[in-house]
Image (cartoon, rainbow, N blue to C red):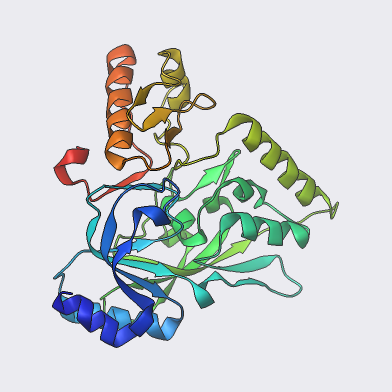
């Protein structure tokens, strides 16, 4: 172990593991290990970690992991610290006699959507089909079915790791939420999010809407090892998936990775496959779309540990 990994283990005990599985924690389930992984279960431990990082002054890279549903980890892994919240951070609190819900950053979106629907609250049904965490959803302003988290957010509690300050509350206007982006920085971790929903006139309507979304997703989007939509929809009339499909690229394969036959903006990985193959498919799809339509597709997923290889 290096000095800093030893320090973290001494500080946080079994919450820290060295040479930890990283790619396996993502929905792609490919990619290498992290030099260290800290699974933080409570706010006191998070502050201990943040104070330690303040003294390190950027000695090693640090990144925050949600549910890993929007990233691809290189086969070489990540030569730094991965911070993942769990435990106390996955709590969901429905405030009595209001339509406001506090979602822990580690809470999963589908679980949160079902809790809201069970309380006859409407406006978060779209989240049932997104396999991410609340914190990750805020970081990228995730959405679906014509809605996004920006539509219902009130505020978020955020901590700058190594910043030397306590967590602060950011209101919606301070989060700069746009299409698949926010003002949350890479060295910041979301602790919780408050959302405001509407009380449904028909108490069963949110649950019916959930069922419709689940059914639609099963019919139109693949399961298996993927990270959802790979490319951001470009400005214009055609979506990324439509451009890819027009080029006949459904089923296009390089090694252990291929474009989904069900939805062309999904790139699948075989069990036991490699991140290198996934990246190769991404690159080739981008090249062909540019050659065919003059459109430069931008990736929606984060590429971790690839260095210049990802450019």
Closest to the observer: 122 or 6?
6
Up the image or down, 169 lies above or below 75; here it is below
Up the image or down, 110 lies above or below 232; here it is below
Q: Is residue 2 left or right of residue 269?
A: left
State the image coordinates of residue 77 (x, y, percent, origin top left): 25, 54
Q: Is residue 21 left or right of residue 178?
A: left
Q: Is residue 63 visible?
A: yes
Q: Is residue 121 left or right of residue 253?
A: right
**Furthest residue in direction front, as rendered:** 272
Up the image or down, 247 lies above or below 269; here it is above
State the image coordinates of residue 96 (x, y, percent, origin top left): 74, 75
Report which quarter residue 83 is drawn in: bottom left
Up the image or down, 28 lies above or below 189; here it is above
Residue at image point 55% right, 64% down: 107
State the image coordinates of residue 5 (x, y, percent, origin top left): 22, 76
Closest to the observer: 187 or 100?
187
**The C terminus appears in which quarter of the rendering?**
top left
Report which quarter residue 246 is drawn in: top left
Residue at image point 46% right, 42% down: 225
Q: Is residue 176 visible?
A: no
Q: Is residue 129 left or right of residue 298?
A: right
Closest to the observer: 164 or 104?
104
**The N terminus appears in which quarter of the rendering?**
bottom left
Residue at image point 63% right, 49% down: 128
């Amino acid at each position: 172990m290096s000095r800093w990994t030893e320090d973290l283990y001494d500080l946080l005990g079994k919450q820290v593991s060295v040479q930890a599985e990283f790619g396996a924690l993502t929905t792609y389930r490919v990619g290498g290990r992290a030099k260290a992984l800290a699974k933080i279960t409570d706010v006191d431990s998070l502050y201990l970690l943040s104070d330690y990082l303040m003294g390190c002054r950027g000695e090693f890279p640090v990144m925050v992991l949600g549910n890993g549903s929007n990233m691809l980890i290189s086969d070489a892994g990540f030569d730094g610290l991965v911070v993942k919240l769990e435990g106390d951070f996955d709590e969901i609190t429905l405030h009595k006699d209001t339509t406001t819900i506090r979602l822990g950053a580690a809470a999963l979106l589908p679980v949160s959507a079902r809790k809201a629907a069970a309380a006859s609250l409407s406006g978060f049904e779209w989240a049932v089909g997104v396999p991410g965490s609340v914190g990750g959803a805020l970081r990228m302003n995730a959405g679906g079915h014509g809605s996004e988290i920006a539509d219902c957010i009130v505020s978020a509690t955020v901590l700058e790791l190594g910043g030397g300050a306590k967590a602060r509350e950011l209101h919606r206007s301070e989060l700069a939420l746009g299409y698949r982006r926010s003002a949350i920085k890479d060295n910041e971790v979301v602790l919780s999010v408050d959302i405001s929903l509407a009380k449904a006139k028909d108490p069963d309507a949110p649950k019916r809407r959930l069922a419709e979304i689940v059914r639609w997703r099963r019919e139109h989007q693949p399961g298996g090892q993927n990270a959802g939509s790979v490319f951001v929809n470009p400005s214009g009339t055609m979506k990324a998936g439509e451009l890819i499909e027009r080029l006949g690229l459904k089923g296009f394969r390089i090694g252990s990775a291929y474009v989904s036959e069900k939805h062309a903006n999904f790139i699948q990985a075989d069990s036991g496959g490699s991140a290198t193959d996934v990246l190769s498919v991404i690159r080739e799809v981008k090249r062909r779309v540019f050659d065919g339509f003059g459109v430069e597709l931008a990736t929606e997923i984060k590429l971790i540990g690839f260095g210049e290889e990802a450019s």
